[in-house]
Image (cartoon, grey):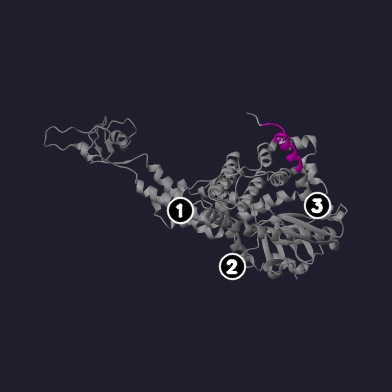
Amino acid sequence: MAILSNEQALLVIKNPVNRRELDEALKHDNRISMHADPVLEVKDYTAAHKNFKAWVRSQIEDGKYKRFESLFTPPIYTNELLDSIYKELEKVFEPRNAFKRFDFASMELEGEFIEHLKGLNDKAFWQNEWWGAFKSAINSVLVVDMPFEQTTKRPQPYPYIVDTSDIIDMVNTKIRVVNASSDDVSYTYKTEYVAYWVNPVTCNVIDDVQYRQYRKDKKGKLTLILEADHNLGYCPAKQVYSEPLGRKESIKKKSPITASLRQLDWVLLYQIAEEYIDLYAPFPIISMYDYKCDYKNEQGAECTSGILEWESQDGKNRGTEECPKCKTSDVMFPGTRFKVPAPSDSSDPDNLNNITFVSADIKNLEYITDKREGKEINIRQKVVGIGSVEDSNQAKNADQIAARFESKKTVLRNIAKNLEIIQKWTYDTYGRLMFMDMYKGSSVFAGDEFFLQTSTQQTKFFEEMKASGLPEAELTMQLEQVTQTLHKDNPNQMARGVFLSFVEPYRGKNIKEIIEISEKLSRSLNPIDVTIKVNFDEYIRRYELEEITLKELMEQDISFETKVNLIKRKLKEYAEEEVLPLPIDTPPVE
């Protein structure tokens, strides 16, 4: 437990113990940021951009480096590449099965806590602030702070993220965590204290018992200006991500992008090389024999290797100038006519054969493009998961597609695990600061099943699986996922769709498929079920007009099975009105 005196806090600011590791963490963040965060002006290039340029300079000769430097303009190519990759990882915020539960001494306190989260715009904080740090500042710190002066009934804690560049010093301790319900063992890091700059002259120091704020005067002297107890028993600061860069690292964290940083550098270099070749491809190199120029100026000066040397008649003035004929001879555009002396007899050489055009090396360009694209695919598969790149040649059987989805899920589950660690810590810190012992704890699960496809993609996938002969139980599960994906942003419609899936007969099959089933079985299907299938949407609308809306039915305090049976009986009555058996004494119609 870290409890700093004022003197110790000042010493932390003046002589940070983990400065070297924090500097390395900042270099790591900056290198990720170069590829992740676009800048629009060369003047905004960071140290990471300059280091990249120095690396390129060590790889190529000076002349080619100058051309590279002129093409290395913002925003850079890998910004776009990582943006598309992060859009895939952002599906971590679209779980099918996430939940949060907060335990208090009374329901009223829970309601007050939920309202506080709404006031903080909690969902937006994780999807914007935390996600921004995850993308390009993986070593940054989340702080839960409070207004210095309390003007409400309870403290009103709020979060913010401290960029790695603003951290003066921090100390983390590795701790062992045992899950009470599953006995699973995991490890996380507890921040003992953190010191960071709020602005160029103000810094905060937070430990296990206090918030402190210092101000620096023009001479560099630090003065304590604010001091407040938080009584948590732990420091209300924690790094935004928990996965360490290495087994012995306590501060530096491992981003999903970290292992691919070198490959991203090569992708960027290859892309600039493509542009370099593209720049010359429209203008082929022309080679020919060097002919003596016959140009003379008004003073009678003759051209010598493209230069005219002249002298005035009185001999007092001398000078040189470019030969105007030679100056324009290298410029060729579409429609240019290039004249050469015609041979006077058979012994004269044909000068047209002495002119050659050297076109761009297509194989070289294809090689560079293939190398870049191959590295991009490799990066995507490492960061997002196998199957993140669509390939028309990939096999489409159920097991292979399922394996591709599982690879993506594994990546998202790892991010979700880190997300739920920081979310639970944050909610618990809010609760203890606001309610002290009346707050009992939380359960936070960020999910392990995600909406990996759009509803259109999932419908297509369902049809492919159905054609491949997937068992009915698997098809039913896939169809439920189609419904959930279609209405993922509308919980009421999702609940409606799930409920109707238990009511509709022959779900997932069209009329043609139902007829085929009947022919395979060599018998007629239940006419009532077939009629309900054909008229299902119409019967549901009639039920809601004449009886009760599905929303009202689903809200009734009866079992789910009873609700399903109630509507099934009514739909059967509707169908029976159309499928009436002939009376016994009625003769058949001839």
Residue 396 part of the magenta segment: no
The type of residue carrying mark 2 is Gly
Three-letter amino acid code at disc 3?
A: Ile
Judging by the rendered image, the residue that carries numbered circle 2 is 246
Q: Residue 474 in the image: x percent, y percent?
A: 61, 53
Q: Earlier in the sequence, mark 2 or mark 1?
A: 2
Q: Nearer the viewer, residue 193 or 224?
A: 193
Distance of mark 2 from mark 1, alpha carbons?
A: 28 Å
Tell me, yes or no, whether the highlighted magenta stretch contains residue 581. yes
Q: Residues within 10 Å of mark 3 (few under 14, many from 20)?
A: few
Q: What is the number of the mark on residue 374? A: 1
Q: Are the residues at dot 2 and dot 1 in contact (C-beta closer than 8 Å)? A: no
Check disc 1 and give the amino acid type. Answer: Gly
Q: In the rendered image, which quarter is residue 10 located in?
A: bottom right
Q: Residues within 10 Å of mark 1 (few under 14, many from 20)?
A: few
Q: Position of residue 182 (x, y in %)?
A: 71, 67
For label 2, count other residues whose C-alpha is less than 10 Å away and answer few (under 14), some (14-19) or many (20+): few
Residue 226 coordinates in the image, percent (x, y)? 80, 59
The span picked out in magenta is 569-587
Q: Is residue 536 left or right of residue 316?
A: right
Q: Quadrant of the C terminus?
A: top right
> Which mark sits nearer the N-terminus, 2 or 3?
3
